[in-house]
Image: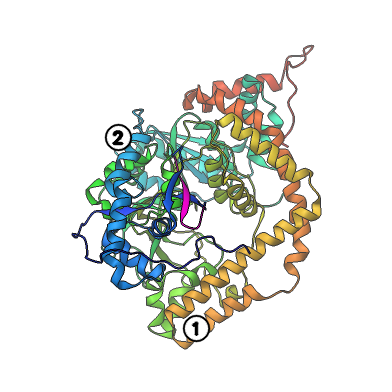
Amino acid sequence: MAQDPFSFDFSLSGSTTPAAFDRTRYVAPPFDARVFSDSEASLLVSRQNEPVRLSITAARLLGACDRFRTLEEQARQAVNQLHASTAQTGQLTRELRDLAERGLLLSQGDLLKRLQHGNPSDHRSTQIDTLFVRTCKRPRTLARLLDSIAVLTEPGELKRCIVLDDSDSDGGDPRTFQLVAEYRSRLPLGLHHVGRGQRRAIIEELAAQSEAEAADLHWFIEGDNDDDQPTYGASLNFALLLGAGEMFAIMDDDASLNAFRLQETDTRHRFAPTTSARLEFPEPGADLTAGFEPLATSPLAEHARYLGRSGGDFAVLGKTDLDALFERVDPQLMHELSAPTRIRITTNGTLGDPGTAGIQWLFSEPKENLAALCTDEQRYHRLIEQRRMARSPDSIQATTAFTLMTTTLTGIDNRELLLPTKSRGGNEDLLFGALVKWMHPGSLHVGLPHMLLHQRPEPRRWRPEDLDRPRSTNRGRFLADQLGRLAVGLPAGDTNSRMDLLRGWLLGLAGGPPDELIWRLQQDMLELRGTTIERVRARLAELKPPPWLAADFQRSLAAHARDDGLDRAGTEAMAQETIRFARRYAAGLDNWRRAWCLASRQPVERLIHPTFTEQANDRRAPPPGRTMGRRTAPLG
């Protein structure tokens, strides 16, 4: 490893009299530094065209200013980080003041102005007109959700709710169809039911009118015929077509609009490099909502308040408390925020089933979230086995990290082209988030500090043997991780160039040596498990849990460290799945764009109206003696 060019002794001369105390907080913008001589360095500061010459000592001092602090706090931080003498704190403070006057340290007010100037407001409407509900043979939970819409939705707040029925029958589940019919008169909005048969007809008519290949659109929605994985992403992808050109919300039928807050919820605005959450455990056997405060406003209104806004708009909402707004900003996040930004995804917390298949993530939670597990062994087991949690963002967070779970209410700004995720298998929401960021650099995800009820019809339980199943990768997680790495350092470009780059990368992935892809999949697995082990070990050392909990920490560590060959056996099959998916996805991108663009010019009601799908039926069944103008294909 090359020696760090800044790994030299730090010394300053001059007076050590402290400067006048200043409460203004500053941070250094991201910069790239190179040593030019024994005493001088050249710095290229983010978003500036001309390099800056500084003494090496000043450059090292600037590099220590990685969070917003007062100049005196920065000086004390520099003393510790650069191994200087505490007697030099006053001189360091004056050096920092000089850097601030030269514009090489930014105050919170400076950053606020930059965000406002570089992120002008979008004056288009931010109304969420459509709520999509994903359902599959669960009329009882769907009825609970529709009841919550009837109670909590004000007239005019939503224009329509579209129930996307993913059951096998073309007409959808008869019980679901009947339920929707019964609720139409009870809701202050248009309520529609779309089964698979109507979905297929809509896709074919969109293909015909946009001159796209129907087979490609069917594949984006339905996936491969021989793929037996659950169609988790199918309804999300179909919603992206029906909701093209507008902002919409989507949720599963086992959630509801009944929303709650944790006690002493922090409603301040914060920019954050990653999401952070509070976690509590409802009492076993007690009512799920006991002890939680109902949300006073509509959750849809909360999402609409932020969805589609710029990073500058978010900063203005939080400007009354700049310390909180910028507390977590680091130079990398500052660099990302300095480009035009847009809030394209909004999510909230979950009260009830956490929506995750595994339990291993729990052992890397912040120690304050695990305090309830340390009081008593029997209580610990009851809290875990019930698989009920109250998990909420710890503030109103705008982040560039898209760690999505679209089970409960998710807002999506679909006014500019968004690409589909994979229709089948897990981690479809992770891949969707990565594709949003890929197509639109500067995208933000806002997490809202309230929770929606999430209660499955058949409650699930965690079992002790779940601790022996380590976290694992799959096609969705792998592609999301790879896209994130690929995006680093690339210029923003427009949507066409981003889509061309994506197509080329996917074809390169599919056309490369299979052994290389297998190696990269194994690397992804090792990184996932290695990172998990690091986090679990760090939490174990920090928490110092009682013996019964420490034993489960060790059990989790052992599961992730085990090498039993099962992962290697599946890697080759996963590589082949990934190759097929990448090749097919790349081939269909232009057809997806054509269909999305056409759908964005059509009112939603027209797309789902029978007359629209009847046109597709007419195209599929031409009169005798005539041939169809376009060839359509069966589900692909």
Q: Is residue 529 above or below residue 609?
A: below
User: Residue 249 location, x and y as percent?
Assistant: 43, 41
Residue pictured at 41% horizontal, 48% vertical = 334
User: Which is nearer the N-term, disc 2 or disc 1?
Assistant: 2
Q: Which amino acid type is shown beneath numbered disc 2?
A: Pro
Query: Mark 1 = which residue?
Result: 550
Q: Nearer the viewer, residue 78 or 514?
A: 78
Q: Is residue 39 above or below residue 568?
A: above
> Element at badge 2?
loop
Residue pictured at 59% horizontal, 53% vertical = 427
Q: Quadrant of residue 126?
A: top left
Q: Nearer the viewer, residue 326 or 250?
A: 326
User: Residue 299 location, x and y as percent?
Assistant: 34, 47
Task: Mark yes or no: residue 226 visible.
Answer: no
Q: Nearer the viewer, residue 57 or 573?
A: 57
In the image, which residues are magenta? Answer: 37-47
Give residue 140's mark. none
Q: Quadrant of residue 109?
A: top left
Query: Mark 2 = which residue?
Result: 155
The quarter of the picture where the N terminus appears is bottom right
